[in-house]
């Protein structure tokens, strides 16, 4: 069994969405002064690898704690879409044999971006027609390898298309070191209550299917 970590490292200098600083570490007790080391973490609910819930954009939508963990655990397929220059469309997804209940992870050229580089505003994203196709197929979660799944959508159509069907979105995955194919996927958001998103640790496991 091989475990592949696909999480974005959480550090104060990690890339933040539109260059926001999403993570702060402070030392509250030090070994030198107190004989013990203790720290405080201040972070955005959308820092590094994180899971978005419908409450992010849908009034009265599910919050992160209202998802069953089973929706973020199971068979995932990594799609190699590194040739896509801008938007992932339905035509990019249709050649794959996707089926109901899969978790779909979108590997794009975004994965080559350095984890503490300035925010790349021209990142590859999923368009709303492709999102609707994934709903049509019946996928149970969608992940992408950057800090957003959409751009240039004033009405946030991609998010809303997925959220209206209670499909969680995993953003900030690191997939450059992962080959296309099927894996067992585990993504565990922090057990926060009442929020629209939460940071998470995400892994793939080979040879478990």
Image (tube, rainbow, N blue to C red):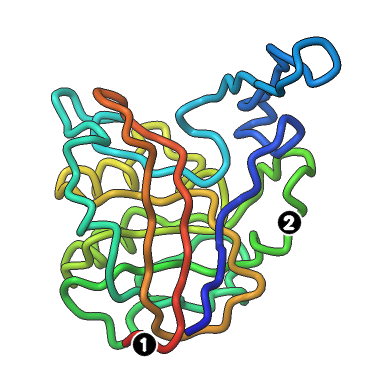
Q: In which quadrant is the C terminus drawn? A: bottom left
Q: Which residue is mark 2?
A: 113
Q: Residue 16's spot in the image, x, y percent?
A: 64, 34
- Identified at 57% across, 83% down, the residue is 179
User: Residue lying farthest right?
Assistant: 32
SS label for mark 2: loop
Instruction: Please indicate whether residue 164 sits to the left or right of residue 50 in the image.
Output: left
Closest to the camera, between mark 1 and mark 2, is: 2
- Does residue 171 sit above or below 133 in this rendering? above
Q: Is residue 169 above or below residue 26?
A: below
Near mark 2 (Cα within 10 A), the count class, few <14, some 14-19 or many ≥20, is: some
Residue shown at 77%/17% (left/top)? 30
Q: x, y (%) of residue 36?
A: 71, 21
Give the residue drawn at x 48%, y 51%. Answer: 201
Nearest the viewer among 10 and 35 is 35
Instruction: Using the image, tell me which numbered label, if any, was put on residue 95.
Output: 1
The part of the image, by quadrant, that contains residue 141 is bottom left
Q: Is residue 78 left or right of residue 58?
A: right
């Amino acid at each position: 069994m091989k475990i592949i970590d696909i999480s974005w490292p959480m550090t104060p200098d990690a890339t933040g969405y539109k260059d926001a600083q999403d993570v702060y570490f402070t030392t509250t007790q030090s070994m030198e002064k107190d004989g013990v080391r203790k720290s405080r973490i201040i972070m955005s609910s959308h820092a590094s690898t994180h899971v978005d819930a419908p409450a992010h954009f849908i009034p009265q939508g599910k919050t992160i704690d209202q998802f069953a963990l089973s929706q973020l655990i199971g068979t995932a397929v990594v799609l190699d879409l590194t040739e896509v220059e801008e938007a992932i469309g339905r035509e990019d997804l249709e050649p794959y044999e996707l089926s109901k209940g899969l978790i779909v992870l979108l590997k794009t050229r975004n994965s080559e971006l350095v984890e503490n580089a300035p925010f790349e505003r021209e990142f590859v994203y999923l368009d709303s027609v492709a999102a609707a196709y994934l709903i049509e197929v019946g996928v149970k979660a969608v992940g992408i390898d950057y800090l957003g799944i959409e751009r240039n959508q004033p009405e946030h159509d991609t998010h809303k298309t997925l959220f209206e069907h209670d499909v969680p979105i995993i953003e900030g995955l690191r997939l450059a070191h992962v080959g296309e194919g099927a894996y067992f996927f585990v993504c565990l958001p922090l057990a926060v209550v009442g929020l629209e998103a939460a940071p998470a640790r995400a892994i793939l496991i080979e040879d478990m299917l």
